[in-house]
Image: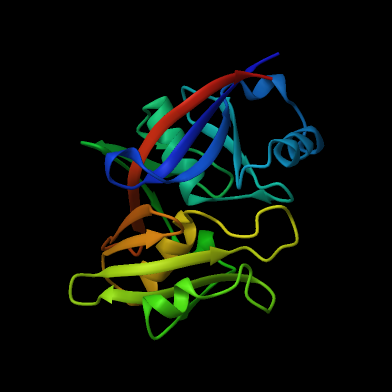
Amino acid sequence: MTDLDVLRVFCGPYGRGGNELGVVRDGRAVRGEQRRQRLAAQLGFSETVFVDDPERGVVDIYTPSARLPFAGHPLVGTAWLLDVPELLPPAGEVFARQDGEFTWVTGRPEWASGRRAQQYASAAEVDALPAPPEGEGWLYAWAWLDEPAGRVRARGFPRRGDAIVEDEATGSAALTLSYELGRSLNITQGAGAQILTSPQPDGSVEIGGRVVLVETRTL
């Protein structure tokens, strides 16, 4: 048996909203890619993290149907939970920092490939989209709420055929959009999640948000 911490990541003000995340702190208790994939599918979170070395920050990330080299909301949540200066997912070294109520991680746009950002004319059009919209492939639908202020309305649709029809908060897609636009963003996604982004001089992008602990379960 081992413990599973359930978090909500990229919460809005006062800890509302956010995307649920499962973190297995003792990854040694669930060894092997097939066992981890089965557990991630059973749990049903958009992502589940297995911590293989808490001191070094070595982590392994799964959706209900795939293993990921990098993902934003799992890394922000795990950085907050472990309170470490860096994490090591398969993609590479991810720097992490705490800044008041926000936890930040740094990623590279090439780590977040495969998420297409499509701009709509208004936030109302984004809100009116069915879940999921017609088509194939990961879609990040977005529109400006306030372009001069960098405020964005977004919704994320994995469209990969598993149980996650709509992603409540998607850090990697936010990273990609921020990189493509070349500016910092304040994104409202899903039912009320908030994601902050900040492009860096070396081409990387910081993504940040609030995290809260929901519960700890025994698996």
Residue 79 appears in which quarter of the rendering?
A: top left
Q: Position of residue 41 (x, y in %)?
A: 74, 42
Which residue lies at the image location 50% right of the left edge and 38% below the top edge? Answer: 88
Q: Position of residue 103 (x, y in %)?
A: 32, 40
Foreground: 41 or 17?
17
Which residue lies at the image location 42% right of the left edge and 62% below the top edge? Answer: 174
Q: Position of residue 127 (x, y in %)?
A: 46, 71
Which residue lies at the image location 37% right of the left edge and 68% below the top edge? Answer: 153
Residue 151 appears in which quarter of the rendering?
A: bottom left
Where does the C terminus fall, quadrant-wise?
Answer: top right
Q: Is residue 109 above or below residue 15?
A: below
Q: Is residue 74 above or below residue 177?
A: above
Left or right: residue 18 compared with residue 64: left
Q: Position of residue 54 (x, y in %)?
A: 50, 23
Residue 201 appears in which quarter of the rendering?
A: bottom left
Where does the N terminus fall, quadrant-wise?
Answer: top right
Left or right: residue 215 compared with residue 114: left
Foreground: 165 or 186?
165
